[in-house]
Structure formats: structure tokens, C-alpha cells
Amino acid sequence: MKNTLKGNVFLLSMVSLFTDTASHMVYPLLPDFLEKIGASKTIIGIIEGIAEAVASLLRSVFGALSDKLNKRKEFVFWGYALSAITKPFLFIANSWLIVLFVRFSDKIGKAVRTPPRDAILSTSVDASKQGTAFGFNRAMDRLGAIWGPLLAFIILALFVDKERGMRYVFLLSLIPALVALFFIPFVKETGEFIKKQKELKYAGLKSKKFILFLTACIIFSFGNSSNSFLLLKAKETGLTN
């Protein structure tokens, strides 16, 4: 396990840690912030719907493109960079359209980086160690999801005006987002290794087990709602800022 958590696995996990710290400083505050600048719940739903649709639809496109160009590392860098550089726009946001732009850009960045990042992770270790590699990466991802709200809470506690406090949280989220970018240049490209491998066979995509799994995911997605509405509901039931 010790050898598995080195090199690309460690570097990309640090990227996930700091990126998710930045994202979760921002995301839990957005529903309340949108209401403060005059957005209705319908608008909040539209923003989240567009953001999630973009992330879902474009992942396969950018994943295939990174395979074709054989430049996964560059896709990873620019995907994370796009999400990072748009966050400060929330500091000056006075319209839900700016928030939509930031969420849209963030999800495009996620669509650009996620498939090539996972491809690099999976080809950086032996097949028998891939579970360990992905598990560690997701653990760092979740740790960032804990750190982010805690940092946001500490910053908000320094402000009497909560809207002003939120804006400074959005601005300061740029710091961990930029720290995440620092690790990417040290990641080793694995595209050449992939190029030398045998072509993958896609017969498994037609198997009954895969189709059942995909069907279950689709049904769950229809029943799933945006966390933004859960946060707003929590506020309505008495949870304070």
C-alpha cells in the first residue's frame, strides 16, 4: 500500500484535497447567497440543473478527446485551472447570471479534468492496486469536503454582515484552488503507456449486469434532488447561517 500511494496517486490526491476544500467553501453558501441577491428558488434550480447537465454530458466528450490527443495531463491542468480562476467572480456578483457563469465554468472544468485524471490514476498503478489508489483519492476528496465548510464557518464568524462574509469566503477560496494547481506539473503523463496497450474490448458494455447497473443509476438520478434545495430547506426549518 505504501508504494501505491506515491507519485501520481499522491499528487492527484493532493489536487483533489485542495480543490474540494475550495469548492466546499463556496458550494454550501451559494443557495443562501443567491436568495440574498434576489434569486428565486426556480432560478436556483435552473442554475443547478444547467451545471449538472453540463458536467454529465461533456465528460465523455473530453474523455475521448484526451485519449485521441494523448495529452491527459494538460486536460487535467486546464480543467482545474478553469474552476479556480472563475471563483473570484462570486466576490463581485450582484446577479444570479454571474453565479450561473461561475457554476457553468466550474462544471465544464470538472468535465474536462475528471476522465483524464481517472485515466492517469488507473494507469499509474497495477490493476491489483487500483482500488487502493482510487480509495485514497476519494478519501482526500472527502477530507476536502470537510475542511471547506469548516474554513468557511471560521471566516463567516469574523463578519457581522453575512453577505459580505460570504463574498470574502468566495474570494479566499481561490487560495486552496491555486495550491491544487501547484501539484499538477509534477504528475507524470501516462498517455504513452496507454497508447501501447491493446485496444479495449467493449463487449462488456452490452452485458446484462452493466445494463442493470446503468438502469439503477438512471432511476436514482431521476429521484435525486440538488443539495441546494436541501440547504434551503434546512434554513427554513431553523438552521441559522
Image: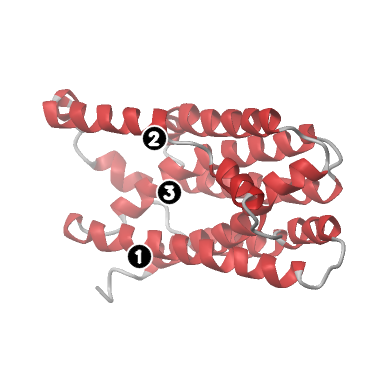
Instruction: Name the front one of labels 3 and 2.
Output: 3
Of labels 3 and 1, earlier in sequence is 3
Residue, disc 3: 117
Question: In the rendered structure, are the residues bearing label 3 and label 1 in contact, judged by CB atoms less than 8 Å apart?
Answer: no
Q: Are marks 2 and 1 in contact (CB under 8 Å)?
A: no
| Colouring | secondary structure
Q: Position of residue 119 (x, y in %)?
A: 35, 46
Q: Secondary structure at mark 3?
A: helix
Tell whether 77 sits left or right of 3.
right
Residue under label 1, please give it.
Answer: 136
Circle 2 residues within 10 Å: few <14, some 14–19, many ≥20: some
89, above or below 179, in the image:
above
- Numbered badge on residue 67: 2
Amino acid on which disc 2 is placed: Asp
Residue 7 in the figure: left or right of residue 165: left
- Kindly report the distance in space between the C-alpha atoms of the residues bearing marks 3 and 1: 14 Å
Query: Which residue is at the front of the view, 153 or 142?
Result: 153
Q: Residue at x 70, y 40 (%)?
A: 102
Count of number-bearing discs: 3
Q: Residue at x 44, y 65 (%)?
A: 140
Q: Is residue 89 left or right of residue 44?
A: right
